[in-house]
Image: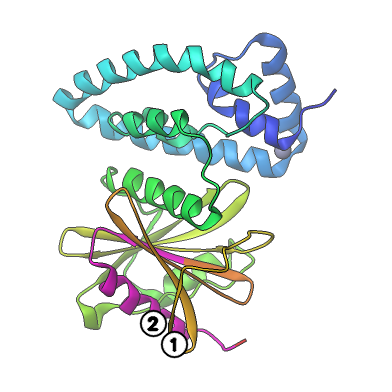
Amino acid sequence: MAMTCQEVRAYLEAYLDRELPIRETLEVDAHLTFCMQCQWIQAKEREFRALLRTRLRREAAPETLAARIRHGIRGLERRSRWQSIRRGLRWAPLPLALAAGLLLAVHLADRREPPKPDPARALAADLVRKHVTYSQVEEPAEVVSSDRLQLAGWFRDRVRFDVPVPDFSPSGIRLLGGRLSDLGDRPVAYLFYAKGRQLLSLYAFPRRELDLPEGGWTEVNGERYFLTQSQGHAVVLWGRGETLFALVSLLPQEELLDCALTLSRLLPRT
Ligand SMILES: [Zn+2]
């Protein structure tokens, strides 16, 4: 029986590590020959691993530490990976963080927990994980530019939804660039900003069938924002039409909310 996308994605981490048994490897291969979405996720995953490897190599001392941690954790993971896959794909592995040295500790902790029932908090945790991963990378942007029009044009050629590129410079927040990423099977437009040395991530992605909770929203200027914290990071999440937006940073939550309001003013009313 052919593998589903969900199975392929659960196997992807082991597949890329060449730890998958031959039969499953062939099934993943077969799926990847026709499924564009899984191909895309796989390509992004490889690209991201390469990026992290470059970074780890540049830091000679932490490399040794990272290698030791990686080795230790891999042992544990190998034991748990099959169990978790066998348990019926209860939670998909988080392949991106695998090569990220210390991030592995977080990765492993996630695995031990059952999946969070609250979709907005689970989403916030995913976005923070991405933010943390990218802030480890020296040059996280795929396209480095502080030109808002150029970035908006770059996204227009690549994703089907509108990606507004707001100007946060009155708040001392400068634009660094953008990249394409993904959240599960959703394409994500990702904008990097910084205030001083503090990275601020702005995500835009299609809402599709994503369920957000009814409660826990804060209303400002007639619009609802979901404010939360994950791993010490502030997260602001909101939607307009068919697009969801999220801001993640170690900056104070009020500053993020300010940015959210600035962006909301740019968007057409629905
Ligand atoms: Zn697929």
For image coordinates 52% across by 68% down, the residue present is: 215
Q: Are marks 2 and 1 in contact (CB under 8 Å)?
A: yes
Q: In which image quadrant can residue 55 be found?
A: top left
Query: Taking 26 as reference, is 233 left or right?
Result: left
Report whether residue 12 is seen: yes
Per the model, the C-alpha gap separating discs 2 and 1 is: 6 Å
Return the residue nearer the eye: 97 or 54.
97
**Residue type of the residue flagged with mark 1:** Arg
Above or below for 217 versus 159: below
Above or below for 264 versus 91: below
Residue 84 falls within the magenta-colored stretch = no
Residue 254 falls within the magenta-colored stretch = yes
Q: Which residue is mark 2?
A: 261
Residue lying furthest right in this view? 1
Q: Which residues are magenta?
A: 246-269
Numbered tag placed on residue 186 in the rendering: none
Return the residue nearer the eye: 123 or 9.
123
Q: Secondary structure at mark 1?
A: helix
For image coordinates 47% across by 68% down, the residue present is: 216
Residue 135, percent across and down? 28, 48
Q: In which image quadrant can residue 201 be found?
A: bottom left
Residue 123, percent across and down? 50, 53
Above or below for 145 versus 185: below
Residue 45, percent across and down? 51, 37
For image coordinates 53% across by 19% down, the residue present is: 81
In the rendered picture of this protein, how many numbered marks are placed on residues? 2
Query: Taking 162 as reference, is 165 left or right?
Result: left
Q: Is mark 2 within 8 Å of ligand 1?
A: no
Q: Which residue is mark 1?
A: 265
**Residue type of the residue flagged with mark 2:** Leu
In which quadrant is the C terminus drawn? bottom right
Return the residue nearer the eye: 49 or 117.
117
